[in-house]
Amino acid sequence: MYRNDWEDGIVYRIGEFSKLGKTTVKTLRYYDEVGLLSPADVDEWNGYRYYSASQLFDLYRIVALRQIGFSIDEIRQLATAQSLDLIERRREELAHQHATLTDQLSRLDHYLSIQKEGLAMSYDVIIKTIPASNIFSSRQVLPNYSDLGAAMMSIGAKISADNPGICCPEPGYCCAIYHDGEYKEHDIDVEICQETDKLGKDGDGYTFRVLPEAQVAAVLHRGPYDTISAAYAYLFDWVTKNGYTIADSPRESYIDGPWSFEDPAQWLTEVQVPVTK
């Protein structure tokens, strides 16, 4: 039952007001407790709470902000001072969530299409961030992929001899960056890189530098280096179909290689393509 003897016009009991505002009595009591929306009047004899029709504007604003995703504390801040920073920060959060969900949906669609076509999943692509690190770097042109293992062993031994105070973390980031921009069978322009604990002194055929942080799309390849072209083909296709842009030269990160196993079938390499979205 409403009252019409309040100084500003008709007021409604809390149950009636909750129906008008399409919310619950419990919620209105909570808003009162936290100082977000208090009744226009409380009967001193029976404790009945009364709300004015104009308070629906306040209630709708609270509900609208809650549906956007603001917390009660944030809405209380907005009630005391219109903070554009708070609103803009929430927008950035929602934009990030939207981008994340859009990316996940695209990747799920790609995965689903492969399953529906009955194709074997040879590779599983992940997105990861490679942190910045100190490295030694040796850029060479190799006649064939099969020459890579020997080149890595040779340059590693040379740098250890020239810089005895330099240590390579275990496990450290060991990679080759392919500056041709695409997979090649012969005359491969490759930069051999190995993470170090600090920057050393440059020498004949190698330098020390900081490798910047990079976001990459990556797949694992088990086997010798001269059979890795299938991994590249799959990864480049995945990058294109999932809306990513290639940001830099592709890399290979070596987890197990000739230093771990004599049998090339046991070598494990992560193929990485720096990407942006």
Image (cartoon, grey):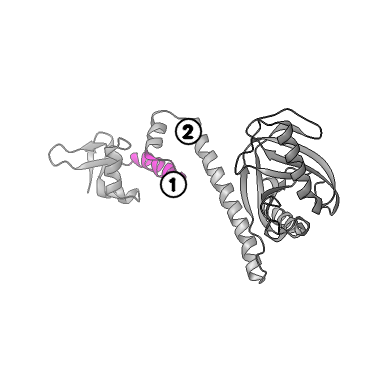
Q: Residue at x 61, y 52 (%)?
A: 103
Q: Nearer the viewer, residue 197 or 115?
A: 197
Q: Is residue 62 magenta?
A: yes
Element class at badge 2: helix
Q: Position of residue 36 (x, y in %)?
A: 33, 36
Residue extending farthest bottom: 118
Amino acid under disc 1: Gln
Q: Is residue 121 left or right of residue 87?
A: right
Q: Nearer the viewer, residue 84 or 197?
A: 197
Relative height, residue 81 to residue 168 (above, below): above
Q: Which residue is mark 1?
A: 67
The magenta span reads 53-72
Q: Which residue is mark 2?
A: 86
Q: Examine the residues drawn in magenta and state their main secondary structure.
A: helix
Q: Is residue 235 visible?
A: yes
Q: Earlier in the sequence, mark 1 or mark 2?
A: 1
